[in-house]
């Protein structure tokens, strides 16, 4: 039996990946939820082959690859990540990863990659393996918040890849946060942030199959000039600066919503983005939403641009009435 280590902070991601493993691959599976746990398992001989995520708390995948090399540990690593930036793929190969597969891993692609790397012997032509490999584990119980966080993680990786291509940068990704807020609590937090610093915000509504909400992109006014420079623009006034902010929001919000929609099999219709403070305000947004729902399911994603003083906060605010349908869609994806 081959000692296989599956390392990902998301229980759902580990469940999906274990299910995607070839049934005819003789492995003994160990799981780790962060890089430190992974390294300890590798040192104990439980990671001859490692399937490694990149975006994790405590210690991320890049740090794990660096430590494996520094300590001379004998592990063959395949990175499986939602961060699909070309630069991310280049960096992990430079650090010693044998291959890169985008999340969620396709069973056929995973099988072909393992065969190509010599980690799995191809099945004899006289007795082909039929059907999609499925592997279950009774210990893999996934809760809704973890599942939505993983769906958002994959979606934000696709949005970051698009942003990286447009701006010619490397986007640093965090682990998304998923919380259920009273709308009034979120309102006060955002209002305090806006008073403390000069922020711009772009809001865009979305709806599809009984799932609706608002996407809110926050960024510092002082960073607008740097965004314009990266885009090769020289805004001559407030209107041109606003266009740049709306373009940036379209990239991040559109790509992120598209990534979520694809995973849970929903088609979102999106409203026109509005620059808050010009056409409406954060106060106005929450006055409207307070009439429609009392609580909101908030997904918080922060993007930081490496080597630039730039960061953007994206909030996906799902209406209270959307939670039941979203839960149903997420559970269907998990099963």
Image (cartoon, helix red, strand yellow):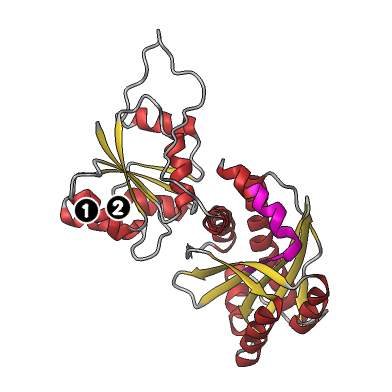
- Quadrant of the rendered image containing residue 230: bottom right
Span colored in magenta = 315-329
Q: Position of residue 33 (x, y in %)?
A: 37, 55
Determine whether, in the image, residue 254 is placed left or right of residue 15: right
Is residue 193 magenta-colored?
A: no
Residue 237 visible in the picture: no
Image quadrant containing the C terminus = top right
Q: Residue at x 22, y 55 (%)?
A: 40
Q: Which residue is mark 1?
A: 69
- Quadrant of the rendered image containing residue 211: bottom right
Q: Residue furthest bottom?
A: 196
Q: Which residue is mark 2?
A: 95
The correct choice, above or below, for 169 with respect to 147 in the image is below
How crowded is the residue under tag 1: few (<14 C-alpha within 10 Å), some, or many (20+)? some
Query: Does label 2 or label 1 sit earlier along the sequence?
Result: 1
- The reply to whether dot 2 and dot 1 touch (C-beta < 8 Å) is yes
């Amino acid at each position: 039996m081959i000692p296989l280590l599956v390392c990902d902070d998301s229980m759902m991601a580990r469940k999906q990946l274990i299910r995607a493993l070839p049934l005819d691959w003789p492995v003994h599976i160990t799981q780790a939820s962060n890089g430190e746990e992974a390294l300890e398992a590798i040192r104990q001989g439980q990671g001859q082959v490692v399937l490694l995520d990149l975006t994790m708390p405590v210690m991320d995948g890049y740090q794990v690859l660096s430590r494996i090399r520094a300590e001379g540990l004998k592990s063959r690593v395949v990175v499986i990540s939602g961060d699909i930036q070309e630069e991310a793929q280049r960096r992990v190969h430079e650090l010693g990863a044998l291959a890169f597969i985008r999340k969620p891993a396709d069973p056929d692609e995973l099988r072909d990659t393992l065969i190509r790397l010599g980690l799995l012997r191809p099945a004899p032509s006289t007795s082909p393996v039929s059907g999609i490999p499925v592997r279950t584990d009774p210990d893999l119980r996934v809760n809704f918040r973890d599942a939505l966080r993983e769906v958002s993680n994959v979606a934000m990786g696709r949005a970051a890849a698009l942003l990286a291509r447009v701006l010619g940068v490397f986007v640093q990704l965090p682990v998304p946060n998923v919380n259920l807020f009273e709308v009034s609590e979120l309102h006060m937090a955002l209002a305090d942030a806006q008073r403390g610093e000069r922020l711009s915000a772009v809001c865009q509504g979305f709806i599809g199959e009984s799932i609706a909400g608002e996407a809110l992109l926050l960024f510092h006014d002082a960073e607008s000039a740097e965004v314009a420079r990266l885009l090769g623009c020289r805004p001559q006034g407030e209107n041109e600066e606003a266009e740049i902010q709306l373009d940036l929001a379209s990239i991040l919000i559109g790509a992120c919503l598209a990534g979520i929609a694809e995973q849970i099999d929903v088609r979102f219709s999106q409203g026109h983005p509005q620059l808050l403070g010009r056409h409406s305000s954060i106060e106005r947004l929450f006055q409207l939403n307070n009439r429609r729902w009392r609580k909101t399911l908030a997904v918080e994603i922060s993007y930081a641009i490496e080597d630039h003083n730039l960061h953007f906060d994206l909030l996906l605010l799902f209406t209270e009435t959307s939670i039941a349908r979203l839960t149903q869609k997420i559970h269907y994806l998990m099963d």
